[in-house]
Amino acid sequence: MSGPLMWFANRGTGTVLLVLFTMTTVLGIASTARWTSTWWPRFLTQGLHRTVGLMASILLVAHVTTAVVDEYVDIRWFDAILPFGALYRPLYLSLGAFALDLTVAVVVTSLLRSRLPLGAWRGVHLTSYAAWVVSVVHSLGIGTDVGQRWFQVLVIGCVGAVVLAVLLRLVSGRDQHPDDAPLDTPRRAGVVA
């Protein structure tokens, strides 16, 4: 199966993924920093982080599927999963596969969070930063819109948003980790999260 529809689908899902994964990363940073106000409670940030992350994960499946199904470029199904074996733009496709693998690990451990030690979950969840960086490099190396001004502005905006969130997080000096209790666990009276 090939044609412009598959190419546009792959290109579009990749571009939207860059934005969604950036939003997920920024919302995750905001959640751990406990950036709240009277009109923006912490549970809203965490809920958005999870929802946008889920949307991005679903779209990632569509992105990988369109890349593999499109016959214009030879991307085998295992090239999307196993880094460093691809025939087409091997470095950048391998980086995309690596970002996919890291994302799958983050999603799986997040689904199993209540059954995992907190340190193990955090350790795996922190790899999402690497997944985001690698996916940006993948986008710049393999994306067909890299030469377009709008795409360059989009990438600069995404990188700027994450860098700004990280810097604000470092400056805030707040606790390094989110509250260990799940959101649905009742809090003791008088304790501010």
Image (cartoon, rainbow, N blue to C red):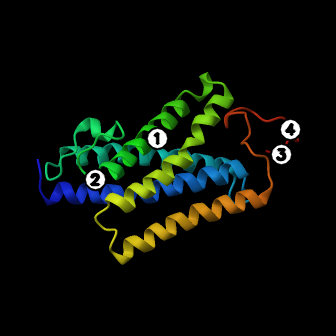
Q: Which residue is mark 4?
A: 189
Q: CA distance from mark 1 to mark 2?
A: 21 Å
- Image vertical order of residue 144 relative to residue 28, above or below: below
Residue with the most extreme top position: 115
Between 30 and 68, the residue placed more toward the observer is 68
Q: Which residue is mark 2?
A: 89
Mark positioned earlier in the residue sequence (1 or 2): 2
Q: Position of residue 107 (x, y in %)?
A: 49, 36
Q: Which residue is mark 3?
A: 192
Left or right of 79, for residue 155: right
> What's the residue at 38%, 70% (across, down)?
151
Report the amino acid beneath label 4: Ala
> What's the residue at 57%, 35% (across, down)?
124
Q: Which residue is mark 1?
A: 103
Mark positioned earlier in the residue sequence (3 or 1): 1
Report the amino acid beneath label 3: Val
